[in-house]
Amino acid sequence: MQKTLSLDGRWQYQLDPQADKGPGALLAADDGWQAMELPANWQLGGVEDYAGVVWYRRSFDITSKGQSEWWLQFRGVDYFAQVWLNGAYLGAHEGYFQPFQFLVTDVLREGSNVLLVRVDSPREEPGTVWPGHKRLIKGIFNHHDCRPGQNFPQWGQSQNTGGIWHSVELLTSPAIYIEQVHVTPTLVGQVAALTVELTIGHLGRQAAEGQIDISISPLGAEQEAIAVELQPWVSGATGSARLHMLMSGYLGAL
C-alpha cells in the first residue's frame, strides 16, 4: 500500500531578485530566511507584487526508510522549479498545473533531511510578449482580463503569482502496487461480461514479474464468485503495466 508523508506547513523562503544565489550557500546559511506556510501563492503568503526567483527550504526527519521506494512529489509549482535534496540536484520542471515527482530513495536519509527548491515566476516582456504573445500557461492568472492592470503592457502583470501553490509530499510504497482498477460491464440478456483493466504501478528500478488473482461476486445474488487467475506478467523498470482481461458469468434474473 502506498503511504504519504505531507511536507506542507512552515517553510523558509528567501528572495533572489538578481537571480545570483546558489544552492550550496543557501543550504548552509541560517540568516536571510523568512517563514511562509505552504502551500501558498506567494502573493498571498507575504511576497507582494514580486516577479523573479524565490528560494524555499524545509527540513524534515525520516525515522526509517525500510525496503520501500521513496518519491518526492510536487502537486503544483508556479512556474519554473529546480529541486535539491540533501545537496543532490534532483531535476527541474516547467509549468503551473502539472504535478511532478522525483525518485529519491538513494538520496533520502534516515534522520534529518533538507529540501531546497528554486522557483522562478518571471514577468514576460511587456508589449513584445505580453499580453498578445504570452508563453506562461497559468490559466486565469495570466489572462489580461483577470489581472489588476488588465491588458496594459506596463501594469498588466502586477500582483504576480508564483511559488509552491499546491502540496508537497513524500510517497513510499512497495515497488509494485495496484494503481487503478477500471471495470466496464456489458449486459447481454442475463449474462454480464466484465472487462477489467488494471494499472499496476511499478516504482522499482528492476524488471518485475507478478501474479494477480481476482474474484467478483454478484451483488444480492446467490451465485458463486467468478474467479480468474491472470497469467504471470512482466513489467519493465519504473512505470506502469496495464493488464486487460474478460470475465463473464450468469448473474441470474436482472
Image (tube, grey):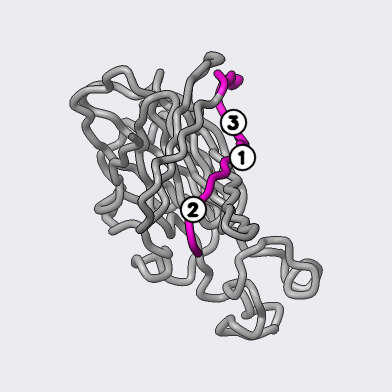
Secondary structure of the residue carrying numbered label 1:
strand
Q: Tell me what residue is drawn at x 57 percent, y 58 percent.
A: 190
How far separated are the C-alphas under marks 1 and 2? 15 Å
Over which residues does the magenta segment extend?
231-254
Q: Tell me what residue is drawn at x 40 percent, y 65 percent.
A: 47
- Say which amino acid is labelled 3: Ala
Check residue 251 in the rendering and tell me which mark sits there, or answer none. 2
**Which of these two is toward me, 214 or 30?**
214
- Say which amino acid is labelled 1: Leu
How far separated are the C-alphas under marks 2 and 3? 30 Å
Residue on which the image places disc 1: 246
Could you say where residue 112 lies in the image, as x and y percent from the top left?
23, 28
User: Above or below — where is 174 with respect to 75?
Assistant: above
Secondary structure of the residue carrying numbered label 3:
strand
How far separated are the C-alphas under marks 1 and 3? 17 Å
**Which of these two is toward me, 72 or 177?**
177
Q: Earlier in the sequence, mark 2 or mark 3?
A: 3
Could you say where residue 30 lies in the image, as x and y percent from the top left?
25, 39
User: Above or below — where is 43 with respect to 235?
Assistant: below
Residue 175 drawn in magenta: no
Are circles 2 and 3 on residues that touch, CB within 8 Å? no
Residue on which the image places disc 3: 241
